[in-house]
Each structure stands twice: as structure tokens, then as C-alpha cells.
Image: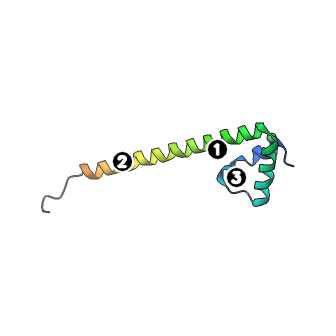
Amino acid sequence: MLSCKEVTQRAGDWTDGTLSLKQKLAVRLHLLICVFCRRFLRQYKLAAETTALQACQHDHHEVEKVLKMIDDAPRDQHLP
Ligand SMILES: [Zn+2]
């Protein structure tokens, strides 16, 4: 059985889905009996998703900026 410390150390891999099947089962087993780690992992996942969303919005903003620069660029007058 994993300890709470071992579960929290695996939080990143758990959220990323990179744990092995054996590790996943060990974490799930611990979560069945430990409300603290359930809460911790839920919060951890939420924080990771929020961070990912912010990064995504940032990229979206950059794309909009580049598109506007292309729109604003002077066009070649010789083209129809
Ligand atoms: Zn625990």
C-alpha cells in the first residue's frame, strides 16, 4: 500500500496519465481509503488543467496578433 507521500509524489504522472498500470492501481487503491489524497489529486488536476488552459489562451492570443499583422500588412498594388 502506498503512503500519502508516495501518492502525492506521483500526482504529476497521475495527471499526465503516464503511470504504469501497476502504479495506477496502487494509487487508485490508496484513493479508495484516503479522502485527503482524493482531494489533493482533484485539486492538483484542476490546477494543472487551469495552467494548460492559460497557456492555450496565451497561444491563441499570439495567433490573433500574427493574423492581425498579416491583415494590416501593405498589399502589393500590382495584384488584382
Ligand atoms: Zn493518502
Residue 54, position as x, y percentages in the image: 51, 42
Q: Residue at x 51, y 45 (%)?
A: 55
Depicted 21 relative to depicted 68: above or below: below
- At a point 78% along the width and 50% down the height, the residue shown is 27
Q: Quadrant of ligand 1?
A: top right
Question: What distance separates the C-alpha of mark 3 from that of mark 2?
Answer: 33 Å
Q: Crowding near pointer 3: few (<14 within 10 Å), some, many (20+)?
A: some
Percent across and percent down for residue 53 are 52, 44
- Specify which label sits upstream in the sequence, 3 or 1: 3
Mark 2 or mark 1, earlier in chain: 1
Q: Is residue 7 left or right of residue 43?
A: right
Sort mark 1 into few (<14), some (14-19) or many (20+) by Cα contacts within 10 Å: some
First-in-chain label (3 vs 2):
3
Question: Residue at label 1?
Answer: 45
Query: In 3D space, how far apart are the residues under numbered discs 3 and 1 (Cα atoms)?
Result: 11 Å
Identify the residue position indicated by label 2 in the image: 64
Question: Quick one: SS at disc 2?
Answer: helix
| Residue that numbered label 3 is attached to | 13
